[in-house]
Image (cartoon, grey):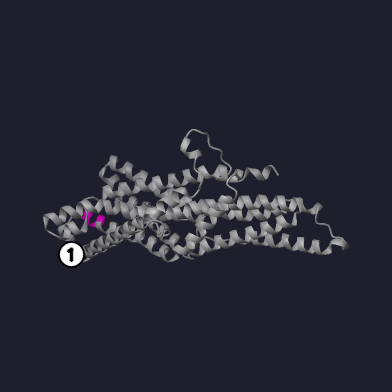
Amino acid sequence: MKASLRGSFPANIILPQVIPFIDRIQDPLALQKVMDRCFGVINWDSQPIISFAKSVSLFFMFSYYIVCCFCALFFINPAEVTPDIYLNMWFYCAASAFCSLQWIVLFPSRHYFSQIVEYLTDIHRQDPFHPFRIRSRSMIFLSTAFLLTMNTCMAIFWSFLLYGSCPIAGAFRNPTVKLLSSMIYPVQSIHMATISNCAMVTCFAVLLVFTVEFDIVGEAFREAFSSWNSAQVRNCIERHRRLLQMVNLFRDHLRLYLLIAVGLYILLVTFTCFLLVVQLHAGDIQAMRYNVINAAFSIMTIVMYGVVCDLLEDRIREVGQQVYNAEWPSKLILNHGHRGRYLSGKSCLVMVIARSQKKVGFTCGNIYQMSTVTSMQVLKLCYTGFTVLWNATNR
């Protein structure tokens, strides 16, 4: 029994009490809820003023983006601007399209995501002092904050890199229009990236909370089958069924988002590799350092997506292993006086183990599996592109 109490990440790490406010976090989805209230797709009804401000900012953001794309497509003459500015314009259009699509594909499923977040919040409130939940709250918060910080740094980096390449400023000769559009351009770039980061925080935090909850239900199953408490077994089966139902619901409405999110990071890594090749030939070491850091952040984000999906799959399978390792052989004995109890217990064991062995299967648009292996394959593809580009420019 003690072995089962160790749990897995993020419930197996005990942080030193060096950051006071971390210990006061009572909700593992605290950061996700704050981000979603201001930029996300789930929360729209809590405060009308915030919802109105969010709607106005989204309308302005999408309108500004559409105007930028229209100007880049119809009003910008490639012969009148430098190649790097023209390339930056189209990179902004492509990256912003990925960021916008993340919000667009999640918006129709906002009620399902709200249902999932409410369910996870409710079961956490029922027993907030479970050792796994106590240990995991701070780790979920810090892991999500770390991912958010990396992506916010990337957003700031790209906004500085793209400064001066606003399509509206290049399309119109009016000094006032050029000044205003150039000032709004980096702000809109960061706002667009923040919309994407909010969706990322929701995905990552919910996956980690699911991981902890399957750890908890696995431990509960082990205790229930070891003591052979019928009421406790039935309760665990219902909790397990509901958790699997919520995970499958989350998976079904996350497929297209994962495809777009991975596509965005592939674009960022690929464009960064192109810039690195150019800067290596130009000998611009200072700019190259920032691009290396930026590429590293993008790579880490892709890998973290794969790792957390694999972690959740492992925790779901581990529930069946916990049941199998319980002390039920000494309790589940066939005799004529308790034949019904024996058959019921046997069917419960088989059902729980069978459910646990079924793979959830997080995919990117049903095209390929979202896992650590596929994440590394995507990165190998980006590295291959970098080497091909480097060799081609050296000839």
Q: How far across and down, in percent of the image, does residue 34 sit? A: 42, 50
Q: How far across and down, in percent of the image, does residue 128 sit? A: 57, 46
Image quarter hosting the N terminus: top right
For mark 1, what is the residue?
Answer: 75
Confirm whether residue 378 shows in the render: yes
Count of all numbered marks drawn on residues in the image? 1
The quadrant in which residue 382 appears is: bottom left
Q: Which of 95 and 174 is in front in this view?
A: 174
Q: How far across and down, in percent of the image, does residue 36 sit? A: 41, 54
Q: Main secondary structure of the magenta part?
A: helix
Confirm whether residue 296 shows in the render: no
The quadrant in which residue 48 appears is: bottom left
On screen, residue 328 above or below 368? above
Decide whether residue 243 is among the magenta residues: no
Residue, x 20% and y 52% (percent of image)?
182
Q: Which of 67 and 241 is in front in this view?
A: 241
Q: Outermost residue, top direction? A: 18
Q: Nearer the viewer, residue 317 or 387?
A: 317
**Label 1: few (<14), some or many (≥20) within 10 Å?**
some
Decide whether residue 87 is among the magenta residues: yes
Relative to 276, 326 lies left or right: right
Q: Outermost residue, left direction? A: 174
On screen, residue 257 above or below 186? below
Relative to 263, 8 lies left or right: right
Q: How far across and down, in percent of the image, does residue 240 sit? A: 63, 58
Residue, x 28% and y 54% (percent of image)?
188
Q: Which of 168 and 225 is in front in this view?
A: 225
Residue, x 28% and y 43% (percent of image)?
287
Q: Is mark 1 on a helix, strand or loop?
A: loop
On screen, residue 258 above or below 28? below
Residues shaded magenta = 83-88
